Amino acid sequence: MIKGWQTKKLGELLEVQNGYAFSSKDYSESGHFVMRIGNVQNGYISLSDPKFIQLPSDGALQRFVLSEGDILVSLTGNVGRIGVVKREHLPAAVNQRVAKITVNKSSPATREFLLFFLYSDRFREELMGAGHGAAQQNVSTKDLVQIQLPIPPLPEQRRIVGILDEAFVGITTAKANAEKNLQNARALFESHLQSVFTKRGEGWVDTALGDVCGFVRGPFGGSLKKSIFVADGYAVYEQQHAIYNQFDDVRYFIDEAKFKEMKRFELIPNDLIMSCSGTMGRVAIVPRGIKRGIINQALLKLTPTAKISGAFLKSWMESEAFQDALKEYSGGAAIQNVASVKILKEIKIPLPPIKEQERIVNKLDHFVIETQHLENIYQDKLAALEALKKSLLNQAFTGKL
């Protein structure tokens, strides 16, 4: 122990309260914002997918109502995420598997010093170490209050908080600039991609998609029940392969007899696959050398004819024009599902001569390389800034700051 420092359990410094199991059937259009596990992110409160509930102005449920400055911590899944309640989040109430933390007035550690500790890897690692559960990690408030915090004298706490505050402001500004540059790089590529299909040259013809490629929608779900899968054999390609543009990670396989029965769904090099449900419209080109296999029900297979380059078709399908058309013609409420093959075949693609397609693809490939280079620079910058934050927090609670 560093001279002059003391160690205390969090339970001696904080009041920790579990959230309430609000029922989704009681959600309403307005009222108290229900702070659920998904709203507590790394250092902030997410307002995505908000849920509300009407609470009486008095009664037992009032103890779950939040105030500005309350600290929240996640207790399930990605445990140890911290968020601080702000005025714009109110009125709000804390849901189950989220704990509300308030600092005792008698605590020898200031709220600011404690909050930085809660943001640290040290806190998260200790909390995760106390977790239980295989598929999904869970911790309890009893686990949380047992974690120990090294506490320096008050003047040292203030010095450390001052250094961290100043450093974190600079890091936040630098991260915002890097993220803006990253967005600009991606927007520049999207703008260039869009311009390719709007600034048409001589010989371009609007052509129905069904005239330049073959379509095969994946088999009905009943054709590929898990009971027929085998340990190894012919691959069953899924949405993830289109979404992440990779064909190595295969979860399911079928035997030769089933493959022969479903041969029309086979993938061959230069085919395109497109995701058809939920994360809809993601496209990948089938490379050479993949494991032989078929598509499942969540994919669409497109086979280009000699009239169109597979790479040109992929670029157009990733453009705003096609993606907007896809959304317009596709249905689904909570989860969108792609339009029927018959409708997709009627979508018009602006088609130049094959030589011009190849020239455009080469130009786009060059632009992709440049964009990826810029993205890598900004991603590295963001990673370095995050590492700096972690390093500063580690130094703060080991007396090295």
Image (tube, helix red, strand yellow):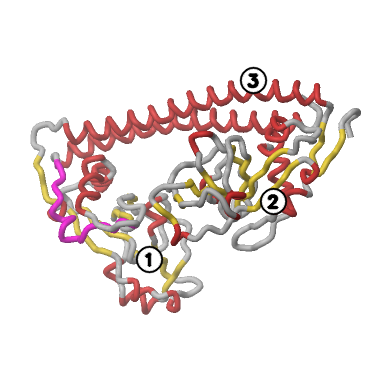
Of 180 and 61, nearer the camera is 61
User: Residues under labels 3 and 1: Cα distance?
Assistant: 56 Å
Locate residue 143, reporting x and y percent: 74, 53
Residue 344 is inside the magenta segment: yes
Other residues around mark 3 within 10 Å, as few (<14) / some (14–19) / many (≥20): few
Q: Residue at x 61, y 43 (%)?
A: 72
Nearer to us of marks 3 and 1 is 3
Q: Residue at x 10, y 38 (%)?
A: 204
Q: Are marks 1 and 2 in contact (CB under 8 Å)?
A: no
* Numbered mark located on residue 293 in the image: 1
Of 59 and 385, nearer the camera is 59
Q: Quadrant of residue 43?
A: top right
Q: Quadrant of residue 229?
A: bottom left
For this orientation, the residue located farthest to the right is: 3
Q: Residue at x 48, y 35 (%)?
A: 88
Q: Earlier in the sequence, mark 1 or mark 2?
A: 2
User: Residues under labels 3 and 2: Cα distance?
Assistant: 29 Å
* Numbered mark located on residue 128 in the image: 2
Indicate the quadrant containing the N terminus: top left, top right, bottom left or bottom right.
Answer: top right
Q: Quadrant of residue 134?
A: bottom right
Q: On the picture, is 164 further left or further right than 321? A: right
Locate residue 10, reporting x and y percent: 77, 43
Q: Earlier in the sequence, mark 3 or mark 1?
A: 3
**Residues in magenta, as a range:** 335-351
> Could you tell me which secondary element the residue under label 1 belongs to?
strand
Residue 394 sits above or below residue 228 on the image: above
Count the labels in the image: 3
Q: Which residue is mark 3?
A: 166
What is the three-letter code of the residue carrying label 1? Gly
